[in-house]
């Protein structure tokens, strides 16, 4: 009740805010990571239908890391143009690309090409790359855009960003996975009722609705976010809520000139002094951030199939979707219960690391099971949820501490996040697809 009362006071404390701007900001925030989050929770169905099978997650992980070229390209382009390209037009282009890629995914996600001696999901990989470009670049463009609005609307955008993982997870839970593959006798009869053959074939139970419908749902969400952004940027009712009461067509130089007219000379020196007196903890926090992102963003998503699928499709389905749901939940929790103590962060990281050792063990023993299908499967699901929640809380807490210390600390926090994630994805891609015998899959074969 105290939390609800606090939310009510914070909201009503700004009587001049416009509720529809909050709704549009939430809808815009949903586009930030919904494509990749949605693709990830759909993996339990995709691995059963695409030629990469259990190695599919490792391919997608490395593609997402390559998409980090997007923010670098945008930054370089704006630097070459002396940052005269308005952020709004870049965001429009990104959302259009995301909507188009999502719509193409509905029809082409299962199209394959034969090269290198085997089939590959080339259409899916290409479209995932473009969707990842949108999501990765959103991290460096969407927040600056929201910075043009009054500060009271920033939390609404962050709520939408959290929903970008929560909404597709709910849809995936509603979709289900149907069940585990099994073998069954199928009799083939022609149109005249004449017996042709009787064969034993592999049967994959169907979910409540198809992959096509799920990707169509994600496309609708992207289009809604696009229209929300257009309204935020061009509708007079929304532009009145800009902090500078103007459209988001200002360049970086204009904003810097306005900022220089009202300097606060003590702020920078205080930040620098605070950072200089706390270098060792900051370096340790950045090291923890790199380690946590190495595991949770890069390495472990690539081997989740090997950790979960030996226990059945339901265990994999629940592990993926509930792990995705716990991330926004922990972001919401950290808003009310922030963690700022180094010892607490170290303790949470330690517990999460112990759970990650168990999850690594389940992947290495695949296709065998630790503890049997019932007990082992339950503990596997719980471990993925708890480990994901703890590491999400640690990452958010470290980012919050760096933001309070200095802009330099926040920059390096983002840098080590990407470096750790990239090295994790690259290492596991090599171990899964190049090295042999480390991670082993099993397949239902019917003879």
Image: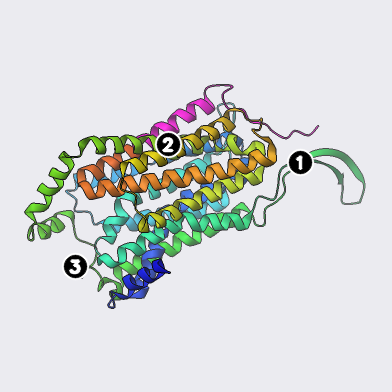
Residue at position x 12%, y 48% in the image: 270
Q: What stretch is highlighted in magenta?
A: 419-447
Asked if the magenta segment contains residue 89, the reply would be no
Numbered label attached to residue 206: none
Numbered label attached to residue 182: 1
Image position, residue 9 (x, y; %): 33, 73
Numbered label attached to residue 350: 2
Asked if the magenta segment contains residue 442, the reply would be yes
Residue 160 figure quarter: bottom left
Residue at position x 30%, y 69% in the image: 234
Q: In this view, does 347 lie to the left or right of 189?
A: left
Query: Residue most toward the top?
Result: 436
Disc 2 and disc 3 in contact, CB within 8 angstroms: no
Q: How far apart are marks 1 and 3 (CA)?
A: 62 Å
Image position, residue 361 (x, y; %): 56, 30
Dot 3 corresponds to which residue? 244
Q: Distance between the residues labelled 1 and 2?
A: 40 Å
Q: In this view, does 121 lie to the left or right of 207?
A: left
Q: Is residue 346 left or right of residue 304?
A: left
């Amino acid at each position: 009740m105290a939390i609800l009362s606090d939310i009510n006071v914070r909201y009503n404390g700004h009587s001049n805010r416009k509720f529809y701007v909050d709704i549009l900001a939430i809808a815009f925030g949903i586009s930030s990571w919904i494509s990749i989050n949605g693709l990830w929770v759909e993996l339990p169905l995709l691995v059963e239908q695409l030629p990469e099978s259990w190695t599919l997650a490792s391919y997608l992980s490395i593609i997402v890391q390559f998409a980090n070229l997007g923010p670098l390209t945008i930054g370089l382009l704006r630097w070459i143009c002396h940052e005269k390209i308005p952020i709004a037009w870049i965001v429009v282009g990104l959302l259009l690309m995301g909507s188009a890629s999502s719509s193409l995914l509905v029809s082409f996600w299962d199209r394959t090409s034969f090269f290198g001696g085997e089939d590959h999901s080339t259409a899916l990989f290409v479209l995932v790359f473009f969707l990842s470009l949108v999501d990765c670049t959103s991290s460096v463009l969407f927040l600056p855009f929201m910075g043009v609005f009054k500060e009271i609307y920033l939390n609404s955008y962050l709520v939408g960003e959290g929903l970008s993982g929560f909404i597709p997870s709910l849809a995936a839970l509603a979709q289900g996975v149907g069940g585990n593959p099994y073998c069954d006798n199928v009799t083939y009869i022609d149109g005249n009722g004449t017996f042709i053959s009787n064969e034993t074939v592999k049967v994959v139970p169907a979910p409540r609705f198809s992959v096509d419908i799920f990707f169509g749902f994600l496309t609708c969400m992207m289009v809604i976010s696009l229209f929300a952004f257009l309204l935020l940027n061009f509708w007079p009712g929304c532009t009145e809520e800009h902090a500078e009461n103007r459209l988001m067509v200002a360049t970086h130089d204009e904003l810097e000139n306005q900022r220089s007219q009202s300097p606060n000379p003590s702020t920078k020196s205080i930040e620098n002094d605070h950072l200089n007196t706390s270098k060792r903890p900051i370096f340790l926090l950045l090291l923890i951030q790199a380690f946590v992102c190495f595991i949770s963003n890069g390495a472990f998503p690539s081997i989740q199939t090997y950790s979960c699928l030996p226990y059945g499709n339901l265990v994999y389905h629940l592990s993926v979707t509930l792990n995705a749901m716990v991330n926004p939940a922990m972001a919401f929790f950290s808003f009310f219960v922030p963690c700022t103590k180094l010892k607490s962060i170290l303790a949470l990281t330690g517990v999460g690391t112990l759970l990650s050792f168990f999850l690594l063990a389940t992947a290495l023993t695949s296709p065998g099971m630790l503890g049997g299908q019932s007990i082992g499967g339950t503990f596997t699901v719980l471990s993925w949820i708890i480990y994901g929640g703890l590491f999400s809380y640690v990452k958010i807490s470290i980012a919050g501490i760096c933001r309070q210390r200095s802009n330099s600390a926040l920059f390096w926090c983002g840098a080590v996040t990407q470096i750790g994630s990239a090295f994790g994805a690259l290492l596991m891609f090599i171990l899964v697809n190049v090295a042999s015998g480390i991670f082993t899959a099993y397949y239902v074969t019917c003879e």
